[in-house]
Each structure stands twice: as C-alpha cells, then as structure tokens.
Image (cartoon, grey):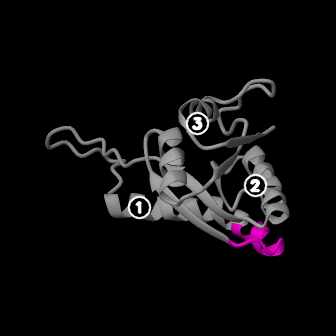
C-alpha cells in the first residue's frame, strides 16, 4: 500500500520514537523512508552598517545547520539500516516547518507522512502540536500521527 514514507524529525525524543515505529511500519509494508529535517532559515541581524558582535556569517550558519541535520537524521538512518529498510535523509531551510514537510513529501513522491504528535514545543500529551496539526490540515497525502 505505502511505498515511500516521509519521516520528519525535530530531534525530540518523541520524534525519534515515531521514527523507530516508522521503520517498523515501513518494513511491514516493504516501503522506503526519507527522513526529513526542516531547518530554520538564515536571518542575519544586521541593521544598516551596524554588525553586532554575535553576527554569524552565512557559511558558518550553513555548517551549523548541516551539523544539526546530521545529528537529527543519522539516528533515523541507523534505525532503518538495522531494520533493513532503505532510507535517505534530507533537510530544507524554512521558517514554516509544516510547509517544508509537505513540500518535501510531494517533491520526493512520498505516499505517506509518518510523524510525531508534537515535538520540541512541549505540548501536553493529549494535544496535537501546532506543526503536526498544520500538516494534517493542509496536506493532501495521508498522515500517520504517532503519539
């Protein structure tokens, strides 16, 4: 039924638990996984000629984002490898994670998004996080929410 599953992560504990279950689900369905991280966009805090002491050049910011993406995506790739499930990882910068998730799912021809009910925002266990809710509201693909 499902052959290509997008598994978004924000590095949270629940996100990793969702990924573990996504690997089991993918294995049971003979599907492959694309792990995805929606990174923040670069916004330099420069005003006119003033460059603050904490200014981060774009190249340094990009290296930090790559390091964070690897930190979040590598555990999912390892889980998939242990489960013998094909897996790739990618990230994209966006100030709107839900839009980046939907765009990544469509661009990679995924037929399911498997994501945690909430992430780093620390929403109470009974509620669905805002980004998850936005994906559910705006995405035309099936979305499996792990709680």
Task: List the single residue furthest toward the left.
Answer: 49
Residue, x 76% and y 68% (percent of image)? Answer: 80
**Quadrant in the picture for residue 47:** top left
Q: Which mark is residue 108?
A: none
Residue shown at the point (64%, 58%) measured from the top left: 72
Q: Is residue 138 above or below residue 105?
A: above
Dot 1 falls on a residue whose secondary structure is: helix
Q: Position of residue 114 (x, y in %)?
A: 70, 48
- How many marks are shown on the rendered structure? 3
Question: Dot 2, how many residues are within 10 Å of its Cα: few (below 14), some (14-19), or many (20+)?
Answer: many
Disc on the earlier residue, 2 or 1: 2
Quadrant of the drawing holding the C terminus: top right
Q: Which residues are magenta?
A: 77-86
Label 3: few (<14), some (14–19) or many (≥20) C-alpha neighbours in 10 Å: many
Expressed as whole percent of the image width and height from the top left, the position of residue 27 reads 82, 65
Q: Which residue shows up at 56% across the image and 60% down it?
A: 69
Q: CA distance from mark 3 to mark 1?
A: 26 Å
Q: Residue 104: horizontal and vertical position, in percent?
A: 51, 53
In the rendered structure, which disc, 2 or 3, sits on the residue that comes first in sequence?
A: 2
The picture places residue 137, in percent across and down from the top left corner, at 58, 29
Q: Which residue does the numbered mark 3 point to in the structure image?
A: 135
Image quarter of the N terminus: bottom right
* Residue 73 appears left or right of 107: right
Q: Is residue 126 above or below residue 58?
A: above
- In the image, is residue 140 part of the stretch drawn in magenta? no
The residue that mark 1 highlights is: 62
Q: Residues within 10 Å of mark 1 (few under 14, many from 20)?
A: some
SS category of the residue bearing label 2:
helix
Residue 50 in the image: above or below residue 137: below
């Amino acid at each position: 039924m499902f052959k290509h599953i997008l598994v978004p992560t924000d590095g949270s504990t629940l996100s990793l638990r969702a990924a573990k279950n996504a690997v089991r689900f993918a294995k049971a369905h003979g599907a492959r996984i694309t792990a995805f991280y929606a990174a923040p966009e670069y916004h330099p805090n420069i005003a006119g000629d003033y460059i603050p002491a904490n200014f981060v050049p774009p190249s340094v910011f990009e290296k930090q984002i790559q390091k964070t993406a690897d930190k979040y995506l590598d555990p999912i790739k390892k889980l998939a490898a242990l489960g013998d499930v094909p897996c790739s990882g990618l990230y994209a910068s966006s100030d709107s994670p839900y839009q980046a998730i939907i765009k990544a799912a469509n661009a990679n021809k995924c037929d399911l998004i498997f994501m945690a009910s909430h992430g780093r925002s620390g929403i109470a266990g009974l509620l669905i996080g805002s980004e998850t809710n936005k994906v559910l509201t705006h995405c035309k693909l099936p979305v499996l929410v792990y709680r």
